[in-house]
């Protein structure tokens, strides 16, 4: 098939067009990677805000829908909806941990990702457990449980 090459990027489906293959490869490096990631996140956030404005699906968290108790990542979708609607303060209030994690993923090509993987697995697990605990306390306070 002319014009379509197999993807050399790990995890990319076979037959990805050349421009997409190059974009996936660049998304893992430097400022171009950050720009591509931020652009993709902005597009997803804007799309989520548009869908939410036209059709509110209600509570998406299974734990909260079944028990009424929020999970540690409750508000994650709200973060992107609020960012896509141009309300960063409301996004921060919805779930600051998810917002910080999104910023970390966006800036990973600048070296944050390498620093994360340089930590021992025990240290990474401790940091993730602490972040989840802080997030859950935030959500329990946000929904009036504490």
Image (cartoon, rainbow, N blue to C red):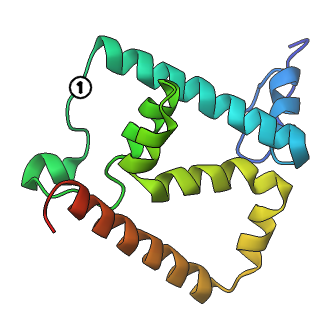
Percent across and percent down for residue 52 are 34, 21
Which residue corresponds to the image point at 55% horizontal and 27% vertical from the top-left?
Answer: 44
Image-based side of 41 in relation to 91, left or right: right
- Up-down relation of residue 86 to residue 119 (above or below): above
Which residue corresponds to the image point at 13% horizontal and 45% vertical from the top-left?
Answer: 65
- Up-down relation of residue 19 to residue 30 (above or below): above
Q: How many marks?
A: 1
Identify the secondary structure beneath mark 1.
Answer: loop
Which residue corresponds to the image point at 42% horizontal and 15% vertical from the top-left?
Answer: 50
- Up-down relation of residue 105 to residue 83 (above or below): below
Which quadrant is the N terminus positioned in? top right
Name, please, the residue furthest toward the front.
89
Give the camera-side residue of 13 and 36.
36
The residue where tag 1 is placed is 57
Image-based side of 18 in relation to 131, left or right: right
Which residue corresponds to the image point at 41% horizontal and 40% vertical from the top-left?
Answer: 90
Name, please, the residue furthest toward the left.
67
Whether residue 13 is visible, yes or no, is: no
Percent across and percent down for residue 91 are 44, 41
Percent across and percent down for residue 126 are 51, 84
- Up-down relation of residue 60 to residue 124 (above or below): above
Neighbours of disc 1 within 10 Å: few (<14), some (14-19), many (20+): few
């Amino acid at each position: 098939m002319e014009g379509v090459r197999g993807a050399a990027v790990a995890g990319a489906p076979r037959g990805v067009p050349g421009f997409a293959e190059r974009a996936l490869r660049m998304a893992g490096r430097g400022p171009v990677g950050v720009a591509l990631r931020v652009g993709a996140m902005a597009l997803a956030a804007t799309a989520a805000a548009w869908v939410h404005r036209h059709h509110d699906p209600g509570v998406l968290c299974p734990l909260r829908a079944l028990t009424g108790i929020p999970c540690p990542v409750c508000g994650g979708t709200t973060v992107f909806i609020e960012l896509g609607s141009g309300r960063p303060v409301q996004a921060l209030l919805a779930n600051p941990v998810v917002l910080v994690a999104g910023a970390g993923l966006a800036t990973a090509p600048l070296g944050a990702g390498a620093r994360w993987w340089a930590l021992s697995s025990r240290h990474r697990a401790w940091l993730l457990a602490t972040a989840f605990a802080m997030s859950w306390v935030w959500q329990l306070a946000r929904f009036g449980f504490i």
